[in-house]
């Protein structure tokens, strides 16, 4: 995981808001000032940006960052992989981030070595779910890079100690929530699991499970109503 | 089962989640192609195809 700068420095760039609202020139201005491509140590064949809508606008930052890296490393830029749902994680609280797991569509070449690119990592669910989607198809995700990281966002993998604490404290609830979200309790990211461990009591966990139970049929209904055959079936998160 | 045992006042507010529409999907394509054209040059698609062909060949040999 390679991070180029701090969230504060990123968000204080004058063009940041425009870049998040899909203005390519603004994103170029932000990215050009902040990145050092030589910080990336991975050998890869393909760069996959997180292509997503944030509320009602496409986020131009991951695209411009990925394109700058593709130019620097003379790598293939994959622009066919998309986030299939619109979750709006920017400034979202922890509940929204955990419940609103991103899903992805689009194909990647099996056997290719992939670098994932996003603008900010906070809870890590976007990067973890995209990694899962690519690896399901046989790609090898060699690393990820973002312009900036929120506190505790740089270590995505769930450490054994945090997993054990979660499963000791609320084993059934952790499994039930993960199942409802479409994966297993081992697949929570480090920061997601830490948030869950820090919940006051089992009732708080139960509220999350109930919300996830209510969201699942809504998402399934949306899929059956709106998902056209123009795009492939979306991924499971993990 | 849990849903029926929790009062609506106690439930979390559900986050707004929706699917990407075909129009938004197209907007993402247009934005990506516009950025690539400006940053990688007008022949970026041809060079992408060349890279893909080389990658296919490399992976096939492995």
Image (tube, rainbow, N blue to C red):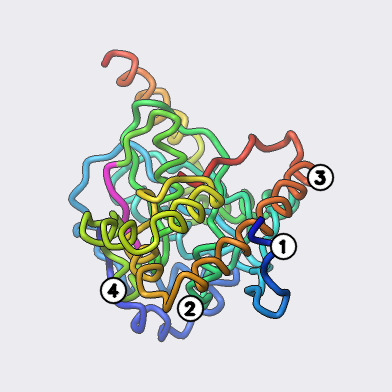
Residues at badges 2 and 1 in contact (C-beta under 8 Å)? Answer: no
When the figure is inspected, residue A134 is found, relative to residue A200, above or below; the finding is above
Q: Going by the picture, which residue comes out furthest to the top?
A: B61
Looking at the rendered structure, whether the residues under marks 4 and 1 are on a common chain is answered as no
Q: Chain of mark 2?
A: A
Helix or strand or loop: what does disc 2 sit on? helix
**Label 1 sits on residue:** B4
Image quadrant for the N terminus of chain B?
Answer: bottom right
**Label disc, if present, on residue A225 of the rendered structure:** 3
Extent of the magenta region? A142-146
Residue at point 37%, 39% (across, down): A46
Residue closest to the eye, B3 or A16: B3
Q: Position of residue A185 (x, y in %)?
A: 40, 51
On residue A16, the disc is 2
Could you tell whether A29 is left or right of A106 in the image? left
Element under label 1?
helix
- Residue ID for mark 4: A5
Which of the 4 quarters of the picture holds residue A58?
bottom right
């Amino acid at each position: 995981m390679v991070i180029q700068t701090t969230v504060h420095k990123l968000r204080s760039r004058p063009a940041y808001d425009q870049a998040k609202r899909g203005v390519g020139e603004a994103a170029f201005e932000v990215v050009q000032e902040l990145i050092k491509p030589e910080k990336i140590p991975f050998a890869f064949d393909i760069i996959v940006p997180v292509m997503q809508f944030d509320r009602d606008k496409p986020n131009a930052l991951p695209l411009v960052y990925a394109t700058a890296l593709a130019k620097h490393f003379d790598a293939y830029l994959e622009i066919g992989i998309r986030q299939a749902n619109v979750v709006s994680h920017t400034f979202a609280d922890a509940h929204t981030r955990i419940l609103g797991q991103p899903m992805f569509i689009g194909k990647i070449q099996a056997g290719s070595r992939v670098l994932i690119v996003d603008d900010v990592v906070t809870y890590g669910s976007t990067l973890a779910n995209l990694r899962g989607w690519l690896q399901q198809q046989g790609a090898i995700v060699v690393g990820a890079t973002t312009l900036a990281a929120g506190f505790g966002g740089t270590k995505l993998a769930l450490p054994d100690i945090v997993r054990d604490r979660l499963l000791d404290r609320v084993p059934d609830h952790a499994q039930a929530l993960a199942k409802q979200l479409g994966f297993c309790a081992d697949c929570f990211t480090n920061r997601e699991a830490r948030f869950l461990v820090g919940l006051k009591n089992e009732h708080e966990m139960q509220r999350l499970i109930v919300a996830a139970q209510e969201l699942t049929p809504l998402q399934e209904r949306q899929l059956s109503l709106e998902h056209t055959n123009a795009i492939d079936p979306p991924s499971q998160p993990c | 089962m849990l849903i029926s045992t929790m009062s609506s006042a106690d439930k979390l507010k559900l986050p707004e989640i929706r699917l990407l529409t075909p129009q938004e999907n197209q907007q993402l394509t247009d934005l990506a192609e516009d950025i690539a054209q400006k940053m990688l040059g007008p022949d970026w698609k041809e060079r992408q195809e060349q890279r893909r062909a080389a990658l296919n060949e490399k992976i096939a040999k492995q």
